[in-house]
Image (cartoon, grey):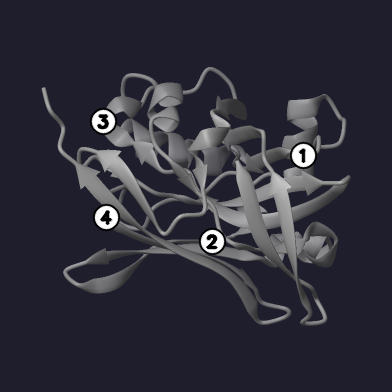
Amino acid sequence: MKAVFQIESADGASRTLETDIRTLVVAGWAGRDRAAIEHHIEELAAIGVPRPSSVPLYYRIADNQLTQAACIQAVGDASSGEIETFVFAVEGELYVSIASDHTDRKLESHSVALSKQVCAKPVGTTAWRMDDVAAYWDELVIRSYIVEGGAEVLYQEGTLDSLRTPQDLIAGYTDGKALPDGTGMTCGTVGAIGGIRASTTFIMELFDPRRQRSLKHRYEVDVLPEIA
């Protein structure tokens, strides 16, 4: 997938970075401690999703599912988003953006891998250099909002200290090597406030409390009829 990011530097400068992401990986069950993992496992078990065989797990997703579009299409009304940090490598340097591991929740009870594959994965259009935030990574906040009853509702929020670091997840995927150029990886999520549920609007943010800046992205879901 050809992607274009505006790289926002720590000094406020901005530049355009174009890259071709040829390998897309979703790192699942990426909680840093067992209690956080169990919370997410139980949250998904409530909607019929089987327990993972091991943690973390790395799901390969077709790279053509990655999109920076403001609208995606999904069959049926049982899919929902979840915010994750998204890391990608270009010429040996690591960058961080945000993405939604949009998933078909009905299919998820049958196969987690298939449920992730059938949905597009929206990714933001802005990013930071990993080197600019790595020293205080745990302080960064991910949050998302959905629209219910015409109002924006906080759906997820948490600091990244509850999740494995990108470096840890990358090492687990590459056997300790650097993330290859052209590879993008989502790095886990936090629990849904009030339970997992669908919305045709998903708004996501990665907030940097030290520099008071954010990466933001919003997308809509066009629900296609589920024909039997």
Image position of 181 with respect to 86: above or below: above
> Circle 4 is placed at which residue position?
199
Residue 35: where, in percent of width, then height? Answer: 54, 41
> Circle 2 is placed at which residue position?
158
> Circle 1 is placed at which residue position?
168
Label for residue 106? Answer: 3
Foreground residue among 15 and 120: 15
Work out how far the residue at label 4 is from the one at label 2, CA to CA, in angstroms: 20 Å
Label 3: few (<14), some (14–19) or many (≥20) C-alpha neighbours in 10 Å: some
Asked which quadrant contains residue 39, the reply is: top left
Foreground residue among 76 and 18: 18
**Could you tell me which secondary element the residue under label 2 belongs to?**
strand
Work out how far the residue at label 4 is from the one at label 3, CA to CA, in angstroms: 14 Å
Foreground residue among 173 and 76: 76
| Residue type beneath disc 3 | Lys
| Residue type beneath disc 4 | Ser
Relative to 27, is 68 on the left or the right?
Answer: left
Foreground residue among 227 and 142: 227
